[in-house]
Image (cartoon, grey):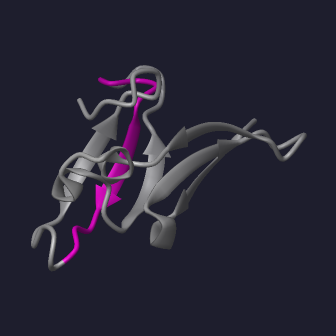
Amino acid sequence: GNLLVLARNFWSSFIVDRATGDIVWTYEGDHKNGTDPAQGLLRGHEANMIEPGYPGAGNILIFDNGAYKLRKHSIVREIDPVSLETV
């Protein structure tokens, strides 16, 4: 299986192929593409893929701490790994 890795201080999450070490998926949040940084992934952690049989199966949950100057509250993000959209 692959590894789901969240690099908190890079505000990014990755799926790494365990056999090759290649990064096969990346989620960098909206702050990387010029949109409002408060809407992006801010100091995320605890990334987990929703298991089959549960609502949202295959999506990724990330606890998003927020950042005091950008967004003062925390949220839980559910990310569609295909579209990279928060659902």
x 46%, y 28%: residue = 81
| Front residue of this view, candidates 60 and 12 | 12
Can you give x and y, in whole percent of width and height, for residue 46 in the image? 43, 60
- From this view, report whether residue 2 is shown above or below residue 47: above
Can you give x and y, in whole percent of width and height, for residue 34 in the image? 29, 47
Q: Which image quadrant is residue 75 in?
A: bottom left
Is 50 on the left or on the right of 56, as rendered? right
Is residue 60 part of the magenta span, yes or no? yes
Can you give x and y, in whole percent of width and height, for residue 13 in the image? 51, 51
The residue most toward the left is: 72
Can you give x and y, in whole percent of width and height, for residue 33 in the image? 35, 44
Please name the predominant secondary structure of the magenta segment in the image: loop
x 59%, y 47%: residue = 14
- From this view, report whether residue 13 is shown above or below residue 42: above
Q: Which image quadrant is residue 68 in?
A: bottom left
The residue most toward the bottom is: 68
The quarter of the rendered structure image containing the N terminus is top right
- From this view, report whether residue 70 is shown above or below residue 26: below
Is residue 13 part of the magenta span, yes or no? no
The residue most toward the right is: 20
Residue stretch rendered in magenta on the structure: 55-67
